Amino acid sequence: MDTKKIQAAKQYIHSKIMEAPDLGLILGSGLGVLADEINNAITIPYSDIPGFPKSTVAGHKGQLVFGDIEGVQVVAMQGRFHYYEGYSMELVTLPVRVMKELGVQTIIVTNAAGGVNTSYQPGDLMLIKDHINFFGTNPLIGPNEERYGPRFPDMSSAYSKKLLQLALQVADEENIRVRKGVYVGMTGPTYETPAEIKMVRSFGGDAVGMSTVPEVIVAKHSNIEVLGITCISNMAAGILDQPLTHDEVIETTEMVKLKFLSFVKAIVRKMNGG
Ligand code: HPA
């Protein structure tokens, strides 16, 4: 872990913002619209931040947006770094380290993913109750920085039960149907084969995607509370008799974005005691 890089990014950001964020938002494919809801926004392109790579995927913007939502100081990642882009696990999770340094105590992590559970439908929102790390690596491999967290972090409650309950209550109040399931993280960039999806299902996975797991591991390591929200953008391979495309993922997230926006805003309001 390159603590100098973390500090350099923190210092640069400190010189640009007025107020420290309490809540981090990591916005997945097509879900970056949430950052447009931030009031008094200060936007910092990743390319300006020392040590940050440039995000490259279509549908991802590549900037941090600071400001407030529902009275809460937030920092949003509009676009994230994916392992399949060729970035190291350290770079993929660098923004989470920087968020922690800036004072973030809670993160809402979002993504688009394929539905593995056959009762799911494209457009469904799923609260992540747990994950399976299928990346074949772990962002905490390497020397441990005790200042951030322990060598062997507990992962028995990576996703805060308290925040999951809060989100379920909000969904109920706002009449938003949500699922609760296990997110399986794979490297991509290929979508899975039908045989892989059968395996994922038999292992207990409900949704499959190419992100989130590294960021959540690093967040948990440094004692950040995590709420995970997945937008089911398509049914995973082999469930329907049709090929998967990134266009379908973006189309579905476009369709869902208003529901997603009002859900997350209501969650933030409730977190703030509203
Ligand atoms: N598989 C993996 N990642 C994804 C998918 C999928 O079906 N949909 C969106 N991200």
Image (spheres, grey):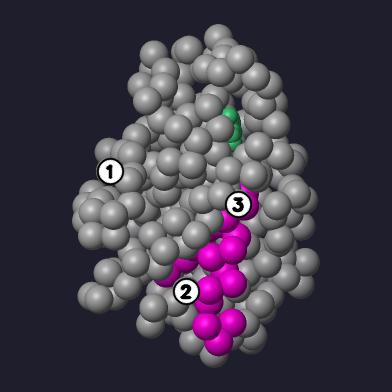
Q: Which residue is the site of mark 1?
A: 157
Mark 1 surroundings: few (<14), some (14-19) or many (≥20) residues within 10 A? few
- Specify whether residue 272 is painted magenta: no
- Give the mark nearer the N terminus: 3 vs 1: 1
Q: Residue 223: in sight, yes or no?
A: no
- Residue occupying image coordinates x 52% and y 83%: 39
Question: Do residues under tags 3 and 2 come within 8 Å of each other at their CB atoms?
Answer: no
Q: Which of 165/157 is in front?
A: 165
Residue 254, which numbered label? Answer: 3
Which of pointers 1 and 2 indicates the residue nearer the eye?
2
Q: How far apart are the alpha carbons under marks 3 and 2?
A: 23 Å
Residue type beneath disc 2: Val
Q: Are marks 3 and 1 in contact (CB under 8 Å)?
A: no
Amino acid type for the residue under numbered disc 3: Glu
Foreground: disc 3 or disc 2: 3
Per the image, label 1 sits on a secondary structure element best described as loop
Residue 74: give its label: 2
Q: Is residue 58 left or right of residue 64?
A: right
Q: In this view, does 241 lie above or below 254?
A: above
**Residue 12: image location, x then y, percent:** 66, 79
Q: Is mark 3 on a helix, strand or loop?
A: helix
28 is higher (above) or lower (below) than 147 = above
Q: Give the range drawn in magenta.
A: 23-41
Magenta highlight on residue 37: yes
Please name the residue shown 46% across and 44% down the image.
230
